[in-house]
Image: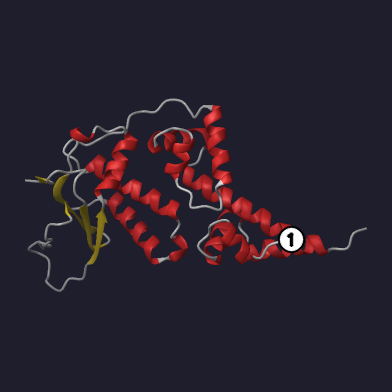
């Protein structure tokens, strides 16, 4: 019988343990982070069977912030200590977070915020005593809010930008802002920010006034490799190609 996590979801941190023994077999364990953790093998599993084990520790404040963004009343939802045989969505979120930690090029604050929020929302939807389902959100962002959000994103391109900060700038919760922004623009705030940064980087590189390292630093990319990946993803060329095109344009003889 699944147990309720004491005083959860908003007073203690939780631990999510993902164990994968084969592409078709993975187990999920949700437990309080301060409790000892033991893996119980099924009878058919050999003691020397290899397993990929991933621990995720989620601070209570992150779950609380996600609940607030979603308009969830904190006293109506309790996470339940439990084991599940499979959860592919959580598996992919967990490994995307691990990739972000291991690869400095993915260490963008916006990327981490996006995945952490996705994890918190997933736990509230799937692991609480009364699973939460998102309400249908009607309409799109009012034109003045959309304009303010876009202006804020472009003004803050060289800063540690977060979706929560953009939502605050237009006086909305992160959840409602994210959903209405996507309905208004056809893309998530995260993708919009990445594309805006890539377009600005392209503009600076074609100007012939900045090096690749300068552009990466100015626009908040973690390094030149991070910039290279984003430029190639959006435009199909490398920063070096754009830089050389800019040099040719500005150094070509005029009539």
Way the structure is coloured:
secondary structure
Q: Quadrant of the C terminus?
A: bottom right
Q: Nearer the viewer, residue 5 or 29?
A: 5
* Residue at screen point 11% across, 72% down: 47
Residue 80 in picture, x, y percent from top left: 15, 44
Above or below 53: residue 141: above
Above or below 127: residue 29: below
Residue 230 in picture, x, y percent from top left: 55, 57
Residue 40 relative to residue 130: left or right: left
Residue 211 in picture, x, y percent from top left: 66, 65
Q: Is residue 126 visible?
A: yes
Residue 114 in picture, x, y percent from top left: 40, 48
**Numbered disc 1: secondary structure:** helix
Q: Is residue 238 visible?
A: no
Residue 40 relative to residue 69: left or right: left
**Which of the 4 image quadrants contains residue 56?**
bottom left
**Which of the 4 image quadrants contains residue 228?**
bottom right
Residue 175 relative to residue 196: left or right: left
Above or below 149: residue 32: below
Q: Nearer the viewer, residue 160 or 236?
A: 160
Residue 192 relative to residue 214: left or right: left
Q: Residues within 10 Å of mark 1 (few under 14, many from 20)?
A: some
- Residue ID for mark 1: 246
* Residue at screen point 37% across, 57% down: 96
* Residue at screen point 38% across, 37% down: 175
* Residue at screen point 14% across, 49% down: 82
Residue that lies at the very extreme toward the bottom in this rendered image: 48
Image mark count = 1
**Which of the 4 image quadrants contains residue 174?**
top left
């Amino acid at each position: 019988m699944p147990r309720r996590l004491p005083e959860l979801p908003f007073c203690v941190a939780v631990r999510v343990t993902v164990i994968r023994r084969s592409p078709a077999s993975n187990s999920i364990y949700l437990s309080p982070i301060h409790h000892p953790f033991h893996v119980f093998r099924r009878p058919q599993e050999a003691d020397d069977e290899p397993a990929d084990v991933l621990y995720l520790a989620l601070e209570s404040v992150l779950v609380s912030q996600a609940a607030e963004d979603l308009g969830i009343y904190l006293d109506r939802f309790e996470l339940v200590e439990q084991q599940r045989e499979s959860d592919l969505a959580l598996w992919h979120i967990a490994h995307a977070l691990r990739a972000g930690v291991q690869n400095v090029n993915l260490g963008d604050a916006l990327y981490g915020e996006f995945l952490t929020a996705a994890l918190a929302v997933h736990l509230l939807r799937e692991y609480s005593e009364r699973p939460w389902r998102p309400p249908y959100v009607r309409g799109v962002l009012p034109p003045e809010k959309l304009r303010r959000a876009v202006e804020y994103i472009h003004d803050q391109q060289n800063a540690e930008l977060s979706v929560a900060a953009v939502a605050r700038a237009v006086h909305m919760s992160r959840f409602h802002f994210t959903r209405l922004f996507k309905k208004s623009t056809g893309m998530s705030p995260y993708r919009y920010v990445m594309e805006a940064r890539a377009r600005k980087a392209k503009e600076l590189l074609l100007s012939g006034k900045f090096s690749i390292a300068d552009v990466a630093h100015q626009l908040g990319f973690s390094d030149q490799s991070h910039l290279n990946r984003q430029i190639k993803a959006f435009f199909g060329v490398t920063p070096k190609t754009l830089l050389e095109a800019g040099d040719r344009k500005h150094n070509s003889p005029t009539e």
